Structures are given as structure tokens and as C-alpha cells.
Image: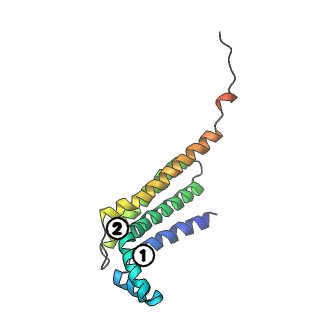
Amino acid sequence: MRKWVVAFVLLWAAMIFGTSCTVIGTDELFSLVGLIFGKELLEQFEIFWGIVWFTVVKGWHVTEFAILTAGMIGLLNVWRPKKRMPNIFVAAALALLFAASDEFHQTFVPTRGGTIWDVLIDSLGVGLVTLISLMRLRQVTLAQSPQETDKPVRPPS
């Protein structure tokens, strides 16, 4: 299990880094869509893309860093199973550092640029997984703790 979790996290981080090294420009995207679907659908796609571009592109930022954070939490839980809460925070911190370093890296890639806004958008994915993980950990902890009804009742004195 441990090897698969390590491999997944490393491959996912490499995929994020790799996609940061390239960019598909609007012209290239439209040419590809036109080639595959024809000129009539291309015109409709251009309108569609103009409307949803921000949601699709930035939504992917959120998603890829949510997946990275979840993978890191899983990896740390395999290595340190008794430290589940600290693992969540360590994974979140590592994912945020990776997001910042990835944006910095993009400042060296021609036609790309790193922005603090993209780090903040990436942090939405990190934050969502962090909150969900903390809520799930709390539920598991509460379910495993003795219930109030299990305590002996002392008669009034």
C-alpha cells in the first residue's frame, strides 16, 4: 500500500509540474476544436469558452491541489497512523508550499506567468480537503470515544 501512495503523490505532483511547463493558447485550442468538430461547432465553442474559461481553468487549479492534498494526507497517515490530525496540517502546508513553488517556477516558463492569485486559488483546494479531513477525523474520533451513556450513573447524595 505504501509504495502505491508514494507513487501516486509523486506522479500527481509531477503532472502538476509538467502541465505548468506548457500552455495551450486560445488559438491552438480553437484550431484543435475546429479540426475535430468543424467550423460550425467551433463558433459555438468560442462563445462557450468565452463564458466558462475562468471556471474551467481555475476550477482545475482547485481540483488538482485538492487531489494532491488528499494524497499527501493518505501518505502521511500510512507513515504516521497515530498522528492523523498533525498529518492533515503537514499535508496542507506541503501542498501550499508546492503551489507557491509551482507558481514561482512558472515565472521562468515562456508564455507563462506565476501569480499570487493562482496560489490563492490552489489554496482553495488545499483548504477544502483540509476542512473535510478534519471534519471526518472528528466524526471518527467521536464514534470511537465512549458515549456519555456508558458512564456509570452515581446516585445523588
User: Could you tell me if the residues under marks 2 and 1 are in contact, i.e. CB atoms within 8 Å?
Assistant: no
Q: Nearer the viewer, residue 36 or 122?
A: 36
Q: Is residue 94 in sight in this rendering? A: no
Q: Which residue is mark 2?
A: 103
Q: Earlier in the sequence, mark 2 or mark 1?
A: 1
In the image, what residue occupies the spot 44% across and 84% down? 41
**Left or right position of 71 against 148:** left
In the image, what residue occupies the spot 32% across and 62% down? 117
Quadrant in the picture for the N terminus:
bottom right
Task: Name the residue type under label 1.
Answer: Thr
Q: How many marks?
A: 2
Protein image colouring? rainbow
Q: Residues within 10 Å of mark 1 (few under 14, many from 20)?
A: few
> How far is disc 2 from disc 1 in space, using C-alphas?
12 Å
Q: Which residue is mark 1?
A: 19
- The circle on residue 54 is none
In the displayed structure, would residue 88 be above or below residue 44?
above
Identify the element where label 2 is drawn. Answer: helix
Task: Name the residue type under label 2.
Answer: Glu
In the image, what residue occupies the spot 40% across and 80% down? 44
Q: Residues within 10 Å of mark 2 (few under 14, many from 20)?
A: many
**Left or right position of 125 against 76:** left
Q: Is residue 79 in sight in this rendering? A: yes
Residue 137 location (% of width, % of height) = 56, 47
Residue 116 location (% of width, % of height) = 30, 62
Quadrant in the picture for the C terminus:
top right
Residue 2 location (% of width, % of height) = 61, 63
In the displayed structure, would residue 99 be above or below residue 110?
above
**Left or right position of 74 against 97:** right
